[in-house]
Image (cartoon, grey):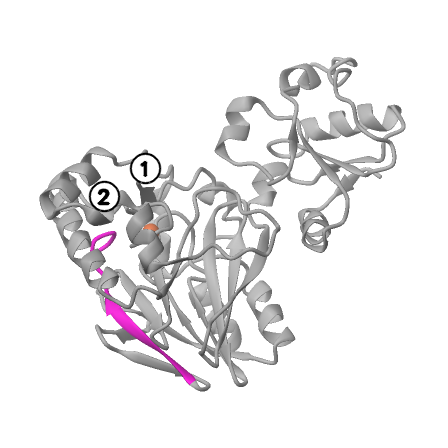
Amino acid sequence: MGTIDTETLRSWLEAGRQVIVLDVRSAADRATSAIPGSVHVDAYADLKKHNPHALDGVSLPVDIPVVTVCNVGHVSQIASEQLQARGIAASSLEGGMRAWSLSWNIADIPLLSSSAQVIQIRRVGKGCLSYLIGSQDKAVLIDAALDPEVYFNLAQVHGWRIIAVLDTHIHADHLSRSRLLAERSGATVYLPDQERVTYSFTALHNGSTINVGAVSLTAIQTPGHTLESMSYLLDQQALFTGDTLFLQGVGRPDLHANAEESRANARLLYQSLQNLVALPANTIVLPGHTNAPTPFDKIPLTASLSDLWNQVELLQLSESDFVEKLVTRIPPVPPHHERIIELNRAGRLIENPIELEAGANNCAIS
Ligand SMILES: [Fe+2]
C-alpha cells in the first residue's frame, strides 16, 4: 500500500471500517481542522528531516490499516514508509488535509409528521452543511457546497430528481455550487432577492413558497449576517437558518460591511432572530455551518428552537446588549472572503477551489 485517496478513506469511515488515521502535522496545523477520531503525533518537523526515529514513540497494531495524514500529502508519505518498514499496513492520504476539505458525510433528519425526507450533508473538512429535501419523486437542495455529483448520487438513491436549488445568502467562506448544479440538472436556482448576483436566478421574497412533491418551503427574510440572508421553513417543522442562527451562536454581521454597517447589521440580526424564536418552540433548526469537524456518526447536527433559546446566551439579550456583544466578539475574517464573494456574485467556480476555501470556519459568534 502506498497512498489512499480521500474518497476511499471517506467511504471506510462512513462504513465504520476499522482504520487508524494518524495525523503527523504540527499541533498548530491540527488546531485548524482534523479528521474526527484521528490520532495525533507531532512528528512533522522530524519526518521532514527524514529522521528515521520520528515515529519511534508511536505504538500501533500491525493488524489494523493505518492512514497517515499531513497538510498536502508529502510528509505523510515519509511517515507511511517508516511504518511500513515496521510491518504496519500504512498508506498516506493523497493531497492531505487540503484534499480532505471536500470530504463529506450524511445524517438523516428525523421529522415527526412531514411527508418530506431531509438529509443533512456535512462537508466535514470545512464545516459547511447542505440539505437535500425529498418528497415523492422530487427534491430541493439548500446551500450546495460540494461537487454536484455528490448530491445527484444521493438523490438518485432515493429516486428523487433535484428540481430546485436554493442558497440562504451570498456565501463568503466557500464557493456556492448551486449554479453549477442547476446547469447540470436543469434545476431552477432560487436566491433571496438582491442585486449583487449577476447571473440569472429566480428571486425569493419574504413569504415566497417553493413546492417540492407534497411539501413546501417558505422563505423568511432574516437580514443581519448579510442584508439578503433568508431562512427557509419546511412544513412548519424544520427551519434552515443558513448563517443567521447556529447551534452554538449567531451569524457574524461584518463580512460584507464596514464597521458602521456591521453595527447596523447586528441590529437587523437581532430583529431577525427575534422573529425566528417566535416560531413554535419545537421547530427543528438546521444551520448552514458547524464549527467543529463532523464525526462519521450519522448523528444530525440540529436542535429545537427552545433548546437554542437556552443554549445560545445571545438570544436572550436586549437589542443594545446584543449589538455591543456582537461587534466586540467578531472573529478573524476568513482568508480569501473578498475573492469568494466576488466569485459567488458571478456564479463562477474555479478549477481548484480548495486553496481559496482553505482555513477555519469562523462564521459564528457565541
Ligand atoms: Fe455566510
Type of the residue with mark 2? Asp
What is the residue that sits farthest to the right in this orientation? Answer: 87
Viewport quadrant of the N terminus: top right
Place of residue 149 in the rendered image (x, y in percent of width and height, measured from the top left): 59, 65
Tag 2 residue: 254
Question: Which one is nearer the viewer's eye here, 275 or 307?
Answer: 307
Residue 133, placed above or below residue 46: below
Q: Is residue 298 magenta?
A: no
**Dot 1, crowdedness within 10 Å: few (<14), some or many (≥20)?**
some
Place of residue 334 in the rendered image (x, y in percent of width and height, measured from the top left): 36, 39
Span of residues in magenta: 215-228
Residue at 34%, 49% in the rendered image: 172
- Secondary structure at badge 2 equals loop
Residue at 47%, 54% in the rendered image: 301
- Secondary structure at badge 1 equals loop
Residue at 75%, 43% in the rendered image: 4
In the image, taking residue 292 as reference, residue 231 lies left or right, namely left
Question: Which one is nearer the viewer's eye here, 155 or 295?
Answer: 295
Type of the residue with mark 1? Val
Q: Earlier in the sequence, mark 1 or mark 2?
A: 2
Q: Is residue 345 visible?
A: no
Residue 20, placed above or below residue 86: below
Residue at 63%, 31% in the rendered image: 70
Q: Is residue 130 visible?
A: yes
